[in-house]
Image: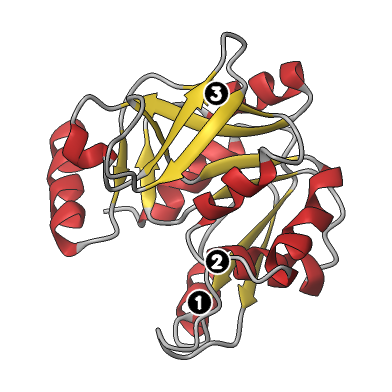
Amino acid sequence: GKPILEHILEKVSKVTDINEVFIVTNDRFYPCFVKWKKGYRFPGKIHIVNDGTTTNENRLGAIADLQYTINKMGIDDEIMVLAGDNLFDFELYDFVEFYRRKAADCISVHEINDVERLKRTGVVEVDRKWKVVSFEEKPENPKTNLAVPPFYIYKKETLPLISEYLKEGNNPDAPGNFIPWLIKKKDVYAFKFEGERYDIGTPESYETVIRLYENKNR
């Protein structure tokens, strides 16, 4: 089968606004990604970024990795951030179109009507214009059924706020942790997509997704 990353990049390649892709990995898997890149054809430029970490203990965390990449690669532009362990049904160009209309930072949301699943993800409340009014990571009592997968679009002006967030000593890990902090500083909107997304962060969920995709491709 196709690597998960290629499923994601297929969606990315349909967004004409995106001309460069940065894939962040650790020191251990860096050679694997470099080898993979050699055999993969993509319309834009792909950079493999080694964050230099070697174990779970010394890893930087998702938000710190983002900051590391912005600094190391000299990124000074609007960015789309996608987690590499999530597969999704929707098209990213719809997300970009929504972002252009709102002209503000955007997150993505979808409805989940299973409370146990909601307790394992980020959950938001929005107003009538889909502006985010509250965000909770893994809530004990979810306030809505709007779950937030790790897909975000940030404006160029927001990039310095990522380092400000980290300098204040905030949680450098799960990318969702940045959102409740950000909504106190500026407007953030939620793009609601239809369809499923699959988090493959555990061996069980990975097995489930493989079965689903095998059936889809039959």
Can residue 166 be seen here? The reply is yes
Residue at the location (20% across, 33% down)?
115
Examine the image and state in which quarter residue 172 appears.
Answer: bottom right
Q: What whole-number distance in Å separates the C-alpha atoms at marks 3 and 1?
A: 35 Å
Residue 106, given in percent of the width and then of the height, sits at 64, 32
Mark closer to the observer (3, 1)? 3
Q: Which residue is mark 1?
A: 35
Which one is earlier in the sequence, the residue at label 3 or at label 2?
Answer: 2
Residue 191: which disc?
Answer: 3
Q: Residues within 10 Å of mark 2 (few under 14, many from 20)?
A: some
Secondary structure beneath label 2: loop
In the image, taking residue 14 as reference, residue 203 lies left or right, namely left
Marks 3 & 1, CB-CB < 8 Å contact: no
Residue at the location (61% across, 70% down)?
65
Q: Which residue is mark 2?
A: 171
Examine the image and state in which quarter residue 123 appears.
Answer: top left
Question: Would you place residue 59 above or below residue 100 in this image?
Answer: below
Residue at the location (78% across, 54% down)?
161
Q: What whole-number distance in Å separates the C-alpha atoms at marks 2 and 1?
A: 32 Å
Question: Would you place residue 186 above or below residue 210 in this image?
Answer: above
Residue at the location (64% across, 48% down)?
181
Instruction: Decide which of 74, 66 is in the foreground and name it.
Output: 66
Instruction: Decide which of 3, 83 is in the foreground and name it.
Output: 83
Residue 167, given in percent of the width and then of the height, sits at 74, 71
